[in-house]
Image: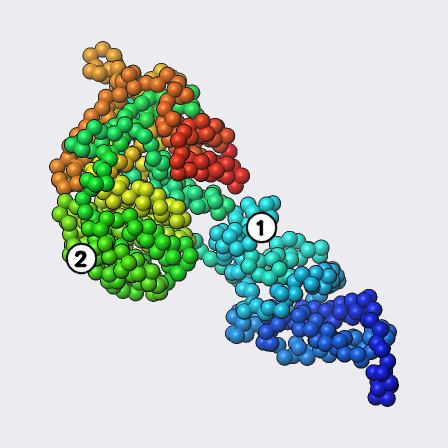
Amino acid sequence: MVDDNQLNRLRDIAAPAPDADAKARALQAALRAYDMEEKTLPAAQGSAGGLRLTERAQRLWSEIMQKKLFATPAIAGLVALPIAGYATIYMLGESKFGGPEFGGDDKITETLADKPATVKPSVVAEADKQKKADADGESRDTGEALVAPTSPPKAESTAVGGLTQQDVLSRNAPEPAQSSELALNGGASSAAPAADGGARVGRMPGTVADSKLMAQQPAAAPADQMLPQEENRDRVENFKTNPVHAALEDPVSTFSIDVDTASYSFVRRSLKEGFIPQADMVRVEEMVNYFPYDWKGPDSASTPFNSTVSVMPTPWNEHTRLMHVAIKGFDVKPAEQPKANLVFLIDVSGSMNEQDKLPLLQSAFRLLVNKLRPDDTVSIVTYAGDAGTVLEPTKASEKDKILAAIDNLTSGGSTAGEAGIKEAYRLAQKSFVKDGINRVMLATDGDFNVGQTDDDDLKRLIEKERKTGVFLSVFGFGRDNLNDQMMQTIAQNGNGTAAYIDTLAEAEKVLVEDASSTLFTIAKDVKIQVEFNPNKVSEYRLIGYETRALNREDFNNDRVDAGEIGSGHSVTAIYEITPKGSGGEQIDQLRYGQASVNNGGVANADEYAFVKIRYKLPNEDTSKLITTPVTSANEVASFDQASTDQRFSVAVAAFGQKLRDEDATAKFGYDKIMEIATAARGADPFGYRSEFLSLVRLAPALGGNR
């Protein structure tokens, strides 16, 4: 042992620089002692003292070495182990792990504490290697090493698997080889197998760069010990793809017009976050109608829209053709548009407290307010645990007052949607503008969980209110709690539209660029009915519009609600038809009844189909009818001779069917879709079509059906 007299003499001797190898061996020994203790405790990272144990051990050792207590490297090596071991044991005794102050899970603590501590040599060796690498890079990581984590990491299934794809991709972008795996597995990459057959916990997005080997994990935990993954609570209406119909048996197709765009925005967000959207979220007609097209419009406001029908070859089936129906609404000049009375009905429940929800909503509505004219009126109603009026009807000339009310919104509470809708309609009636735009604009991320929460009840409530002349549109924000089914139901029955806003650019498109078509309705209850001629068409199928199907008798029933068309809005519907005798039939012909259909004595035998469109003017209850026969004059000789807009809309329709994994496009690759869309991109002032091309490139890379 070294006595006091020897120490006094040693203090007067100039101390040589410590031997680097001896220091490294001593440090590794201390860290090994710490690791051995760590394996026997269910310890979460972090300590009561504010620093992780590795940092505290390193700091204590540094203070000891800075004092000139040792004259030679040999003495340093002898004394290092007991001092470091004592320091480690002292710190372990001082620290508390897994308790409530660290957010620890008592069940996990008890489960791990009951298991015997086992440390395999390979794990220790791996830890030593990691510790040495950390020591070598200490100068680079000093700033991070001295900052204690404010809370320990959650259990793996919550902290990693529970993150949304957006969290993973935006907080800490993975290496290219890992990006698809991260996204497709809920944000958590598979644990890499260790040399001993165990599993190693990888780095979590958002943690410090020097994450250490945490603990030896079994290859698979028992089911009763696994923490559940965070549930995706999106609600989407399930539907089956439209079937092929035999024109002889079922010659009439009837559906409601659709100008919603929510599906396209959701598909885009899904693909950009790294995963293929679920099939029922892909509504092909909403994807096609997302894009502006230069269809021929009506010449005057007396006829609210014009229809253009073309028949062209099908790019994915040589035996069929596409009957392309394009509708263009009359574009009312801004100076001629009536006054607007708008009520912003805003969900401020607790779930809205995310960056892509309430903050994005506030920015979106600011854009709309800046678009309004001075005489327009704005009211604001919020709902959470209950509904409340934030802003009484206020002229848009008082823009600062309106913007301040929007900026002061905060989230918290449950979701009393029913009370909010009633209050919004009350304010809309209070400032009702005759022959003007009276609309409630509902912005939400999810369910109504207080009051009437059943979709049918909400439907009846909104049907009753729309008769007063106040329409309703719905704007969805965020994900993992989005009730798309509810959005579609109340928008369709509120004489309004449904859009999904995932970015500020999308908010600008919906609320600024498309403001006229979004707010100003020129025709309501618009229905389409097509009768196919069995002499020319053997079979047909409607691409999309599954959730908008109507009964044949609904077409002439003015009490049946249908879709709306806004100022300047374009609507596209596409049928795939099988010409008679083409050889592409999928349904066997009937044995009986064929004699009733022949070329002799049949009126209009040369027509492919007869298209009928029924609509009402916004302030009328009686419908009007527009008809268009489809003949050989509507034919286009080759697909390449079709217009740019027609070809691009067909490419979008093919993409939507591909994402839904439909039989029609099973053998039609993404490369063919890309080829058509690229050739038909045309004028693209806002970049929508270029963005579509990027989505087509992403889909096969993410595992989409080729």
Furthest residue in direction bottom, as rendered:
5
Q: Residue at x 86, y 88 (%)?
A: 5
**x then y, percent, for residue 550:** 25, 36
**Element under label 2?**
helix
Label of residue 252 in the image: none
Of marks 1 and 2, which one's residue comes earlier in the chain?
1
Q: Is residue 645 above or below residue 195?
A: above
- Residue 619 in picture, x, y percent from top left: 14, 41
In the image, residue 243 sits, relative to residue 359, either above or below, namely above
Can you see residue 158? Answer: yes
Q: Is residue 130 visible?
A: no
**Image quarter hosting the N terminus:** bottom right
User: On the picture, is 29 further left or further right than 261?
Assistant: right
Residue at 54 percent across and 74 percent down: it is 99
The secondary element bearing badge 1 is classed as loop
Q: Which residue is mark 1?
A: 174
Q: Which residue is mark 2?
A: 426
